[in-house]
Each structure stands twice: as C-alpha cells, then as structure tokens.
Amino acid sequence: MVGIFQLLGVSFLFWTVVGCIRFIFERIEALRKLSGEGSTVALLLAALCGVGVSLGIFVVILSLFNITRVTEPGVGLAVFVLWVGCAGLGAYASGRIDARLPKIAGLLSGLISFVVLVLSLGRALGVPALATDTPLSFAIGLGLSLCIGFFAAVIARHVNAREEKQLLALRAHVDAARITKDEIAVLIAAHNEEVSISATIESLLQSVRPDQIYIGSDGSKDKTVEIARSYGVHADDIQPNRGKASALTYVIEENELLTKYKGVFLIDADIKVDPLFIERAAKHFDDPEVAAVSGYFVAIWPAHIIPRLELLVTAYRVRLWRILQFFVRYGQTWKYLNVSPIIPGGGSIYRTSVLKHIQINTPGLVIEDFNMTFEVRHKNLGRVSFEPRAYLYDQEPYSVKDFVHQIKRWYLGYFQTMRRHGFWFSWFCFFTYLFTFEMLVSAIVFLLTPLMVLELILSGRDSIVVDFVVWGYPITLLTIVLAIFVVDYIVTIGVAIVEKKPLMLVYGVLFYPLRFIESAVFLWMLPQAFRAKSTGSWVSPKRVMFEDKK
C-alpha cells in the first residue's frame, strides 16, 4: 500500500508475526497428515517439531530483547520462565501432530528440547538456571520441562479428539459444501479488451470448459465480443457502457449463474490464470464456513535486458505484491483471525449462496470489490480464504498516467466503501481502521519529507524535533535518508533476490517518485469520498499482447 513506512508500522509487524505463526501451524498439520497418526515416523516428527518450535521462539524472543548474557538479579529467572512457556508450546505442537501418542510425543519433545538448549545455549547465554555446572537448576529445569510438556500434550490430545468429533458431525455438511471445478462459472467484465482477451480465455480453457466461461462486454467498441465468441464461450454485448459492477450483475442475472453453479470465479480480462488455480482454490470450499477464496497475484514480467520506462510500474508492483501478499494478506486470512479488507475482484471465487446476499452493483461507488468484501464481513456471510499457490498473472499499467488513474479508483472506492459501511464492533473493523490510520500517517509523513530536508538545509540546523506531545523525536538528514531511501532500497534488494530479477535494482532507484505520487493520491481521495460519485462508465488502461512484451 502507501509508502515503505508500513514496514515499520504496528500492523505490518503484527501481520508478519501472525503469518509466521500460521505457517508453523499449517506445516504441523501437513506433517500430521503426511506421516500417519501413531506411527514411529510421526512420533519422531512430532518430537523434532516440538524441539524446533521451542528453541525457535525462545531464541527469537531473546534476540528481540537483545539478551546475550544474564547477570542482573531476576533476569535469569524471567528467561527460565520464558523457556518453560516455549517448551509447553513445543510440546503442544508435538501432541497435535501425533494424535495417538501425544503424551509420549510431548515428553520426548520436552526432554530433547531441554537437553539441546542446555548443550547449545546454556553457557553461551550465561543463564545460571540453564548451565550444566548447576545440578540443582538442571534437575529443576528438566523436571519442569517434562511436566509442562506432559500437560501441554494432554491439552493437545483433547483438542485432537474434539476436532475428530466435529469432523464426523460435519462430514455430511462438508460434502454438500464442497465445490468442484465443474460447478464453477467464470465471469469476466470486459471493456475494449480485444488485445488481451484471447490470452485470458486460452489460459482458462486449460482448466474449465468453454460453456463455463461468461463474458460481459460492457460498451466495447472493438472486437472483444467477436473474439470471445470464436472460442465458444458465452459473451453478452452490453450497450451502452454501464460500468463493471453493473455488467457483472447483468451477466449473473441474464444467465442465471446463481442457480446453475455453486461458485462464481470473478476475473479481470487482462489476467492469465494458472492451470491449477481453480483446482487449488476450490479445495478451500471443503470448509463450509469459507465464503470466498482469493489467489496470489503475480505481475507479468516480460523478458528484457535493458530497463524500460514503461515497465517501471510493473517493477514497483512486483515488489508491492510480494510484500503485501507474503507478509500481510497471508496473516490476515488465517482462519482464526480472518480480517483481510479486500477480496480482489481481479481473481477470486465466491460461493453463489453468498453472492445472493451481496449487492454487487452499489450506486455511487467507483469499484465493487471493496464493497463486496465489506458486505461479506458486515453480514457475517463467512470467512475469506487465501491460496498462495493459486497464481494469477496480471498486466500492470504501462504508463504513469494509467497508474494514477488506477490508484485513484482503488483508493476512492476504498474510502467510499468505508464511508458507506461505517464502523461496527468487530476485529475486522479494528484492524482495517488501524491499518488505514497508519497509511494516512505514513502518507502525510512521506509528503512532508522534502520540506523537512529543505528546512534542514536552509536553516543549517542538525535536526528538527517533531513533537508528539508525550515525546519528541529528532529528525536529521541521516534519519531521512535511512528511512526514505536506504531501508526502501534494502527491501528492493531482498525482493530482487527472491524474485530472481536483478533489473529490480535499477528500477528501485526510481520507486521514490511513484511512492510520492501514490501517497499524494491516497490523501487526495479521502475528501473526494464525500463528494465524488460513480457515473457508471469505465475506461480500461492500455493493454498489450502477452507475447509481444519481450
């Protein structure tokens, strides 16, 4: 979203931690299914997993608080208590994996974890309670680790038993809720998309039949309808241009999609779909509580050696999507929290039973996906899931003008939706409004940085003290450079390495103007949400043939 300051925000750090916890627990569940309950392999995997969880969390917390050596009175005891808690969590993880022998798995995990801790960390940390030359402390630590491991494993056993009962009770309901790819209709709203529509349809035909694809050509003046019908798909020629949300509603009602299918896949006309997208996303609907599933967006990166200005926004979005989806959305869509503020309209599957209760075409709103997401939350229609292995390849704007036009619609639609739904007591609202507040602060601070730099240079002062009433924070040229450029570029380096795109290092130098523009547009759209209304028409950005960009 707006600005790299989000990397230092409470929301970003919180969802990064939640995402890590979700990853651990999902890997635990995967190990449990893979190994087979009660087997020797499962027991060993359970114990080893417990060791990893115990030591991992313990070391991370010590690092966060910069504890390298315990010499002050009381600190050693606090560290020891921390270890007991970590050992209990590790034993719980062991018991969750091995359902038939959770007590043994928990005890084994506690024993191995404590021994490894003593041998590897005790002397290095200088913690008396962990050092091997204090037999009494060693005996107490070992005993407490085994006890907490035993009781945590007992709790895990009860949780396992309760889940088994719930699965048996819900089995019939789950069978009814399950959606296969043959029961999903693909719905595309298109406006003058003759350049890209062929590639989109061809990617879809690798996983669905032509009769499952429905295209609403909204006021198109080119060959969009003709090309679509040549593939044998349904194509409605809607005239005149009435807007994306209205076009979606028209196709749904005209073709009775909500009664013919159990799911509707909403996708933009410039997106290529991975052949396994629908199969992987549909598995989430085995959970009756799941209302919609979104996929993982990947910006199309044309093969090129020399940097191109037209691909600057693409490079900017490559970094954004990696950070946003990997660090934020993954945590937000964990089933135990489920507070993601957006079900992307460019590539998500909805249950038709849920769509019946959603007002897609809402007068006055410039975009529909934010409102559809808030409707799901506000009406408690179910959970929103995210499948990081279901890939969608989309084209990003090829000019700054199209980039500005796109983000204006996004942010205006976001603020319009927040104004329409207001606030209701829920975790969804709490986290959404907190994240929005942080983005507003981030955008304001970012736009003020040039003025602060100018002030420091002209005044000759070493720093500017920003008064936050409770405390003041001195801002120097060094802190501005570090926060605005250095940290930002370090993130770019990391994404370039992960994505294996060395040209990102060149494009990253020019990300600052885009971030400045995005911050300005974000703040500009806030007051516009109280004045601007949608006219219903829409204009697609410039498209290119997927194969042409080499």
Image (spheres, grey):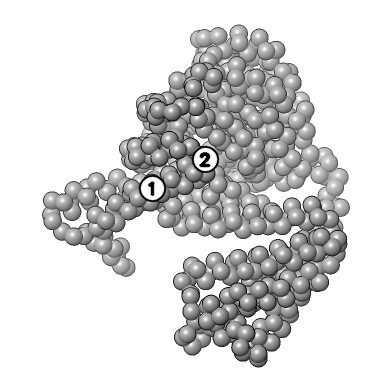
Which residue is tagged 2?
499
Q: Quadrant of residue 135?
A: bottom right
Residue drawn at point x = 39 percent, y = 36 percent: 507
Identified by mark 2, the residue type is Glu
Give the crowd class for mark 1: few <14, some 14-19, many >=20 residues within 10 Å: many
Residue 2 position in % (x across, y down): 41, 44
Give the crowd class for mark 2: few <14, some 14-19, many >=20 residues within 10 Å: few
Residue drawn at point x = 54 percent, y = 19 percent: 547
Residue drawn at point x = 84 percent, y = 55 percent: 36
Callout 2: SS:
helix
| First in sequence: mark 1 vs mark 2 | 1
Residue 7 position in % (x across, y down): 44, 52
Whether residue 467 sits left or right of residue 370 in the image: it is: left
Q: Is residue 518 above or below residue 78?
A: above
Which residue is tagged 1?
488
Front one among 464 and 373:
464
Identified by mark 1, the residue type is Asp
